[in-house]
Image (cartoon, rainbow, N blue to C red):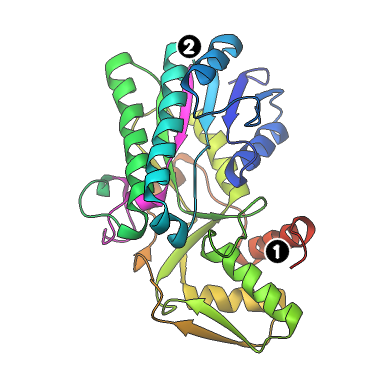
Amino acid sequence: MSPDSKIFVAGHRGMVGSAIVRALASQGFTQILTRPRAELDLLDRSAVREFFKTERPEFAVDAAARVGGIVANSEKPVEFLLENLTIQNNIIEAAADFGCAKLLFLGSSCIYPKHAPQPIREDALLTGPLEPTNDAYAIAKIAGIKLCQAYAREYGKNFLSAMPTNLYGPHDNFDLHTSHVLPALIRKIHEAKKSGAPEVLVWGTGTPRREFLHADDLADACVFLLKNYDSSELINIGSGTDVTIRELAELVCEVLGYDGTLAFDPTKPDGTPRKLMDSSRLFALGWKPRIPLREGIAHAHAWFLENQPAS
């Protein structure tokens, strides 16, 4: 890669895509291609092909996806499956057909079996049943990995797949109905503090363990992989440590200065009991995360305060 390489970032307005654009710009790349949905509908195959044919990006990062938490995944499995399959198929096929030298496809840690041995190694893929609350999204992402590997095997394409752990940061989704656990906790606890509520209700038992990575750390890892990784074998991107949901909620309370109590609702789903990625392959290449969880939560909360409408 050179500073004037043309790099297309799909999904640049989302949390991950926007972080990747920032990371590329901070490292001196000057030709970062982005398109808003009004100009390029990634669900439109012919439009995506025309974009790649005209612009001829040398590198592409697929950070575009329909995403959501347990509620959204459970209520809309058709949309999560169809839309994600369509978006990734369009991008990967067009990148292959119009000379893209390298493509990075971003998956999700939910591709791994619900009861995969911990920490989860890359070779755990397809060794057991998925977590049913997000299996539609997971199946779409698995298909994307397999398509990238098929292009590498059949056509020699340098298409790689990276699996991020649970992410958070600027441009996250803080909607309580569709968000993931950390932004939901930030919003719930912020609103409880603001209203003077004595208690915050947290879904589930609080015992599941989750790993979290700041979106800016993920973006830094993605640029690192574009520069240093040339294998179709998927690679994990995580922080290497995890916490219980109870510990996470308590940490958010500390960072936000909320002194009320936490109540847990065991009638709500916990999801996967534990999900810690084995990121030793990536760490061995020389990359490590830099943003501690406490600092990252404060950063995400500050962005929420600046960018969310008053409740």
Q: Is residue 238 visible?
A: yes
Residue matched to label 1: 301
Q: Disc 1 versus disc 2: distance between alpha carbons?
A: 41 Å
Q: What residue type is labelled 2?
A: Gly
Residue 292 position in % (x across, y down): 61, 61
Is 256 placed above or below 231 here? below
User: Sequence-wise, which precedes: disc 1 or disc 2?
Assistant: 2
Please state if 37 lies on the left or on the right of 135 as rendered: right
Residue matched to label 2: 99
Extent of the magenta region: 101-122
Relative depth, front residue between 184 and 47: 47
Name the element at disc 1.
Answer: helix
Is 216 placed above or below 241 here? above
Name the element at disc 2.
Answer: loop
Q: Quadrant of residue 1?
A: top right
Is 8 placed above or below 79 here? above
